Amino acid sequence: MEILVCVKRVPDTSENEIELNGAGNDIDRDDLVYSVNEWDNYAVEEALQIVDKVGGSVTVISVGDDESEEVLRREMAMGADKGILLSDDAFENVDGRGIATILKAAVEKGNYDLIFTGAQADDGAAQVGGMLAAMLDVPFASLVNTIEVNGDKLKIGREIEGGNQEMYEISLPCVLSIQTGINEPRYVGIRGIRKVASVEIPTLGAADLGLDAAAVGASAARVQRTDYFLPEMGDGAEILEGSTEEIIDKLVELLKAKGGLK
Amino acid sequence: MEPALLSPAAYKFLHIPTALFAFLIPLVGMCAFTYIMKRRIDPLLKAAPDNRFDRILARLWTVAKIWLAQWRQPRYMMAGVIHIFIFAGFLILSIRSTTLVIIGFWESFTFPGFSGTLGHVYNVFKDFAATWVLIACVVAAIRRGIFRPERYAVPAQYGKDHTGEAVFVLALISTLMISESLFEATLAAAQIQQLQPAEFVAPGTLAWLFRNMLIDEPIARLQSMHITAYFIHDLTFFFFLCFLPLGKHFHVITSLFNVFFMRLERGNVKPVKHGVSDDQLDDLESFGVKKFEDFTWKHMLDFYSCADCGRCSDNCPANAVKRPLSPRFISIKGRDYAFANYPLGGANVVKDEAYQLIGDIYSEDEIWSCTTCGACEQECPLGIEYIDKIVDLRRGMVDEGNVPQSLQKPLGALEKRGNPWGKMEKKRSEWVKEIAEEVPVKLFEKGATADTLYFVDSISSYDDRMQGIAQATARILSKAGIDFGILGKLEKDSGNEVRRFGEEMLFQDLKAQNTEAILEAGVKRIVTADPHAYNALRKDYENLPPVEHISELIRKEIESGRLPLTAANGDGKVYTYHDPCYLGRHNQLYEDPRRVLDAIPGLTRVEMSRSGDRSFCCGGGGLMLFYEPEEEQRMGVLRVDMAAKAGANVIVTACPFCLVNIEDAIKVAGLEGKMEAIDLCELVAQHLAA
C-alpha cells in the first residue's frame, strides 16, 4: 500500500512560552522552538505499522519553507521511505484551502492508496484533511483512532463525543485524519536523524505542481486572521482547603452539585 | 613392611587393577569437563569486545580482597560466614582432592614440597577443613531447606524454585568431605590395628571421628571401605566438576575470573562499543544490546557467575517497591538464554534478524525500572555488573525507537532546549534575580570572569522548589568569599541520566555544548550541588577543570574557619543524612556531608540502618522523574519510613532529586508536619553566621 502522510512544522506548544508580538497580530516567534505537529507523528507511526503488516511504502509531505525539511527528516528517521517538500514563495500565508490545493496537486503526481493528515495542527484549524478529500473526490473520515486493512477496504474506528466508539468501513483510496492515541509513536533521536541526513528530499514549487501562484497564494486566501490575543484569566478556580478528608468531602459534594457524580 | 591396606593403585577388584579405573575416571571426567567448558566459552567468543586486561595490579588487589578475602560476604553475616568456611575449605582441600585423584594410579605422588613436614602440617589443616566444610554444608542445607530465607524465593514469573539444586550441591560437597575423611580414617584404623606408624589425625575432626568408630573393624572390611571411599570421592569429584558449569555453581569456576575482570571504576558507563571513540559513533550500524551476542564477553561471564544468592535484588529499590525488575533475574535469564541457545548437545541456535532480547527474555518495563542507584553492584560478592547492561539494553531500545511516551517528551525537550521541561534557555538563570540584592552571581554568558564555576544543572535552575538549593549554594559560596559565576543560558543539562537512559547521541551533544561553554569560561574549578551533574562532569566528561561537590567545599571551608556556623541548639529536631546514590555509592562521598552536619553545634544526628554504601535510593533522578513505572509503592515512602524508624524527623540530603522524591514521599506517607526534608546547602545557609 502506498501511503502519503501530510505533516506540518509547528511551534512546539509544550516547549515554548507563547507570547504576543508587539503588533498583537501574531505570537512572538523569536526564541520559539519548532517540532512536528504532534498528531502527524501518530499518522506517520500508523502508516509505518500498516506498511509493516501489508507492505508498500510511506511518503511524508509538507507545505512550508526550507525549515520544514527538518520535520520531514524526523519523520523519515521514524521510517518513512520518502519525503517531499512543497515550497514556494507563493505559498506563504496561504489559508487551509490553499494548502489543500497545493497538496492535491502533489497527490495527483503520485499514486497513493491512502492519505493521512493529523486530526489537526497545533496552530491550525483542522480543515485541510476534509478539503483535500473533497478536492480529490475520495472518501474522508476524521478523528480516526483505529485502522484495520481489509483488502481494498479499511475498517476504521472513530472516537466520538462521550468516549463512544463508532466503526466504519471505507474504501480505498481515501483520506483519514488521525487522532492521537491511535498508537505509540516511536522515538526518534539525533542518531536517527543523522542517518537520513544525506537522503535527498525533492522540493516542488508552484510551477512543478502546475499551480497558478495567484490562485493559491496569500491573495487567494478566503479567510484571513484579523486578531490574536491571549484570553484573560478567568476566576473559575477554587482552591479547596482543610484536611485531606474534608477536601475529599467538599470535592465529592461539588461534583454532585454540578452533575459530575450521580 | 607391608602396607596396612592396599591402596587404590595396588588393589585388584575381580582381578582387575583398580588403578585402571582410577586412571579412566579422571580421563573421562576431564574430557567431559573440557567439552562442556568449550561449549560454555563459545558465546563469549561471539560477544562484543571489552578490554579488561588493563590495570593488572588493581585487578590482582581486587582478587585478593573480593575473591580471596571474601570481603563482601560478611555483609550478610550468617550466609557470609558459612560461605567463607566453605570457600576456605575448598581452597585448602583442592590440593588434597587433586592429590587423591592422582594417587589412584600413581601411588607415590605428592605435590612438590608436600612430602615432608609441610605435608603433615597440611594434613592436619585439611582434616579440620573437611570437618568445618561438612558442618557448614549441613547448616547451609538446614538454612536453605527449612528456614528458607526470603531472598532465595523465586517469584512465579521467573520460573521454578532453585532450592533443589542448592541442596543437591551441598549433598555433593558433603559426600566429598565424608569420602575423603573415610578414605583416610580407614587407613589410619588399619595402621593402628597393625601397630604401624599412623598418620596423625587431629582430634575432633571428621577423619578422627571415623577412625575411632572403625578402629575395631576387621581389616578386610576396612580395605573394602577404603577402596569404596576412594572411588566415591573420585566419581563425585568429577561429577561435581562437570556439574558446576550446568547451573548456579558455575561460580565455583568462574568467580576468580569474574572478580579479576570486574569493573574498577564506579559511576562511569561503558562506551557504546569498546574500541570505538565518541566521534566514530556515527559509523556504528547498531547501538546497544539487542541480541544476546551484543553483550560483552564480561557481561556473559557475569551471567555464568551469578550464584543466585539474591543479595542484589534484596538491595534493589526497584524490586523493593515491586517494579518489574529483580537484578538477580537479569543474570539468571541471561544465563538460561546462553544455556538454551548454546546447548551442550546440538548446534548453536541462530536467531533471525528481527529477534530482540527485549520482548523475549527481558521486558521493556523491567529495563526502564532501574534507577542506576548501584546498590546491586555494591553488594554482589562476585563483581557482577548491572548498570552497564541496563544502559546497553536501553541503548538498544532507543536505537529501535522503543522509548516510553513518558520519556519522549523530556528527551525531545532536552534536545531542543537543553532541559527536560522545555523551559526557555534564557530563564535558566532566573533564580538569581530573587537574591540579586544580597548575593551577586556573575553570569559567564554576559562575559564575566571568575575562578569558580557553579554548575547548577537543570532541576536547581528551573524547578521552583529546587531553586532554593541554587540560592543557598550561591549564598554559601559568596559567604566563603569565593569568586564564582554561572553559565546561565550557555549551560545545558549535564546529561547524566540522558546517557544512562540510553540516549548516547543526545548526551554527546549536551556534553559538547557544556564542555565548550565551560572551557570558554576559563575557570580553575567547578562546583556543583547536584550529584548527578557532579558524577557526569567527573565520569563522563573529559579535560574539564577539577570538579567538586558543594559538600566537599563546605567541609573544607568550615574546617579552615572561613565559614563559621551558628548553633542548632534547642531546635528539638533529630536529623538523619540520606546518602544520594550519585554522591555516595558512585563517588564515595560519605564523610564530607556528615562532617558538615556535625559541624553545626548542637545538631542531633542519627543514622538510618541503611546508610553509607547501603543507602536506599529515593526513587531516582533526572529522567526517572518523568518515567511512569508500574510499582506498588514509592521508593521515597520506604525511605521516609526508614528515617522515622531511626527516630529522625528531619531528612537531610545533598541532591535536588532526592529532595523532590523525599518531599513528595512525606506527603504521600501523610507525614507532613511530622517529618521534613531539607538539602544540606539549605541547612548550612540557614546556619551561616552573620
Image: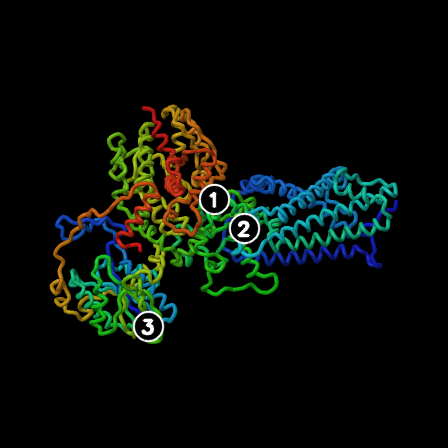
Q: Residue B217: x and y, percent? A: 85, 47
Q: Marks 3 and 2, how far apart in space?
A: 50 Å
Q: Residue at x 83, y 53 (%)?
A: B11
The amino acid beneath tag 1 is: Gly
Can residue A149 be spotted in the picture?
yes
The residue beneath circle 3 is A154
CB within 8 Å, label 1 to label 3: no
Between disc 2 and disc 1, the foreground one is 1
The residue beneath circle 2 is B302
Image side of residue A96 versus residue A111, left or right? left
Q: Residue B315: x and y, percent? A: 50, 44
Q: Dot 2: few (<14), some (14–19), or many (≥20) neighbours within 10 Å?
A: many
Q: Earlier in the sequence, mark 2 or mark 1?
A: 2
Query: Mark 2, chain letter?
Result: B
Image side of residue A69 versus residue B107, left or right? left
Q: Dot 3: few (<14), some (14–19), or many (≥20) neighbours within 10 Å?
A: some
The amino acid beneath tag 2 is: Asp
Q: How many marks?
A: 3
Asked if labels 3 and 2 share a chain, the reply is no
Q: Residue B470: x and y, percent? A: 32, 36
- In the rendered structure, find residue B374 and report the number of the disc placed on it: 1
Between disc 1 and disc 3, the foreground one is 3
The amino acid beneath tag 3 is: Leu
